[in-house]
Image (cartoon, coloured by chain):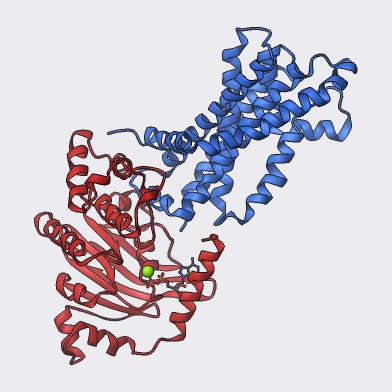
Chain colours: A blue, B red
Amino acid sequence: MTSVLFMMWLRQLKRYWRSKPRMIGSLGQPLLFLLALGFGFGPIFEKAGGGSYIQFIAPGIIAMSILFSAMFSGIEVIWDRQFGFLKETLVAPVPRWKIMLGRVLGGASVACMQGLIVFAVCLLIGFRPTDLAGIPLSFVFMFLIAMFFTALGTAIASLLEDMQAFPLIMNFLVMPVFFLSGALFPIEGLSGIIKTVTLLDPLSYGVDGLRASLTGISHIGLVADFLVMLVLTLVTLAVGARIFSRIQI
Amino acid sequence: MNLSPIIEVKDLVRKFNSFVAVDSVSFEVNRGEIFAFLGPNGAGKTTTIKMLTTLLDPTSGIIRVNGFDSSEKDEIRSSFGIVFQDPSLDDELTAYENMEFHGALYGVEKAELVPKIDSLLVLVDLHARRNDLVKTFSGGMKRRLEIARALIHAPQILFLDEPTIGLDPQTRNHMWNYVKNLNQSRGMTVFFTTHYMEEAERVSGRVAVIDRGKIITVGTPQEIRESTSSGSLEEAFLKLTGHSIREEEASAAEGMRMQRRMWGR
Ligand SMILES: Nc1ncnc2c1ncn2[C@@H]1O[C@H](COP(=O)(O)OP(=O)(O)O)[C@@H](O)[C@H]1O
Ligand SMILES: [Mg+2]
């Protein structure tokens, strides 16, 4: 028997691979940020003594592309409901947590590929990881970010019946999570409430971990980053699987 | 051989807010039977099937499928196969991949799966298109693929929710011959809904007529014809459910339109 997890995973990858416009389209935003901020805002950042801005934001932009792609993959549950395919998986004699986990693994793999493509682009425009040994560690963080947000997107989408809430999720969840994460600015310099908000943002830990492994600069600490992301991912998977299991059609 | 009914439904109720879609329905389906659920649009057929197949929780009432209580969802799910009324294929996968995916979900061995898929695709006349993406298929082709898919694993109960809508008579014939063959050779129980009365009359052992969420009568086609002194099941059906298009039907159609608008279709 071919594993259900594997089939769910493979399906996500096939859909991704066959949808070139989506693949290219979802690279647009990270690239825009990279170029506009890197070349537009960079000189100011560097004048202020922050060091190379490309070095600083590259991990943040990689995290961004993973965040967007992962949330999008999670939200795909609503599409599957709309186009009817969800029913096919929900009546199957397979524990629903397995269906959910397979979906999340597939969506997270797709998000990681997006992250790797953006990583490659960053290298092209001058980003240099300071320690090659950190690269495998950065993959771990990419995967954790991808798993966490795909699971989160899946959990949220399992509660929704249609796409009407989609702009709401983008504007009031994904965008704030990105902008308040320390992807674009150092957490260190922040004060008071903004710093607190930043430390409540899960992506801050992912970005910090990614930045630490690629450039050696960390504001939170690599071990804390890893543990927070790991625990958040496991909890979200568990809660998400419960919510997914209760879907009614 | 287990002689107790394979499907037992008692006082089943499903409400949507205050609207009662299924209103205290009770019936039994015997093992190995071909059982038809007949009723006008919005009668509650699909809602009943969703509850029998674990997709929707009842508001109240008792369901037993294959001896399992409605809380034993995994056990119930391994007891049946289903062709849904609405589309349920992955448009971004090929016909073959949709079949393969189903085989994996139902744990069919690879050695058995490949020839099975091939023969079923031949049965529904889609073998030449097996490597095409489903989104390039017409409505009728998608329907045929869904029927083929439901037959990959050999379920104890097969649910068919208006399976033959949009199919030409040839395909309809093929499908029913295949299903009846499975019914006779393996004792597979079939529970189906249809709008084609002659189809119900021809293939089913017993028929339940449901209207406005309530079961009006259950019996063999012959019994129903005789009790209403009708020449055909169609005539009996119209006598039992009325000739006029009623408000319920209009509101059900409107409900569907609204849902479609919500999906942006
Ligand atoms: N999710 C839902 N929300 C509200 N009303 C529903 C829902 N599903 C079905 N209904 C209503 O329940 C009634 C029965 O629907 P259904 O079971 O699909 O009928 P049938 O399959 O016999 O045509 C219809 O009036 C329909 O509009
Ligand atoms: Mg129906």
Q: Nearer the viewer, residue B151 or B58?
A: B151
Say whether residue A182 is visible.
no
The residue at 76%/35% (across/down) is: A179
- Residue B153 picture location, percent across and down: 23, 47
- Residue A178 picture location, percent across and down: 72, 35
Q: Quadrant of the N terminus of chain A?
A: top left
Q: Is residue A92 above or below residue B176?
A: above
Q: Which corner quadrant of the image does residue B55 belong to?
A: bottom left
Q: Is residue A72 left or right of residue B84?
A: right
Q: Nearer the viewer, residue B173 or B1?
A: B173
Q: How many marks?
A: 0
Outermost bottom residue? B229
Q: Is residue B75 above or below residue B234?
A: above
- Residue B181 picture location, percent across and down: 11, 58
Q: Which quarter holds ligand 2?
A: bottom left
Q: Nearer the viewer, residue A7 or B29?
A: A7
- Residue B222 picture location, percent across and down: 14, 82
